[in-house]
Amino acid sequence: MSNTAADRSETNIWRSPELARTYLAMADSVAHRTEGEAALLEVLPERVERVLDLGCGDGRLGAIVRGAHPDAGGLAVDFSEVML
């Protein structure tokens, strides 16, 4: 049995619109999510020019960083079209 990226893409659960909607509906209640976001903002340098967010999901983290650093450019990428 092969275990290549192409093979795994067929079983990517994040391609499910129902799962994405369910996750987004409860995401704000996940304690470690907001704790991680706060920790990231604390360790960012004073000046942020560019941000690359791989696996960005709904883009929430990028929006938080851009809120704290509005002049920063950014690129957000996610494998799941339904999360974008």
Image (tube, rainbow, N blue to C red):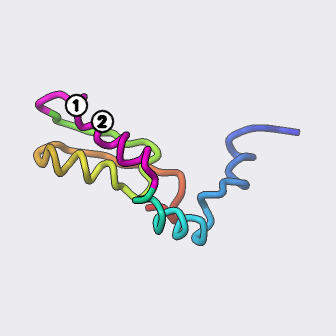
Residue underneath mark 2: 40
Residue 41 on image: x %, y %: 24, 37
| Residue 9 or residue 56, whichever sits in front | 56
The residue carrying mark 1 is 44
State which region is magenta. 30-47
Residues at marks 1 and 2 touching, judged by CB atoms closer than 8 Å: yes
What's the residue at 36%, 55% (across, down)? 59
Could you say which is closer to the camera, residue 58 or residue 25? 25
Q: Main secondary structure of the magenta part?
A: helix
Residue 21 x %, y %: 52, 70
Which corner quadrant holds the C terminus? bottom left
Callout 1 crowding tier (Cα within 10 Å): few <14, some 14–19, many ≥20:
few
SS under mark 2: helix
Task: Identify whether 28 is placed above or below 75.
Answer: below
Q: Amino acid at mark 2?
A: Leu
Q: Quadrant of residue 65?
A: top left
- The residue drawn where x is 54% and y is 57% is 80
Quadrant where the image shows the N terminus: top right
- Residue 36 sits inside the magenta stretch: yes
- Residue that protrudes farthest toward the right in the picture: 1
Expressed as whole percent of the image width and height from the top left, the position of residue 47 reads 12, 31
Query: Could you tell whether 52 is left or right of 69 in the image?
Result: right
Is residue 34 covered in magenta?
yes
Horizontal arrangement in the rendering, residue 8 relative to residue 17 (left or right)? right
Identify the element where label 1 is drawn: loop
Residue at the spot 47% in from the left edge and 68% down from the top edge: 25
Q: Residues within 10 Å of mark 2 (few under 14, many from 20)?
A: few
On screen, residue 68 above or below 42: below
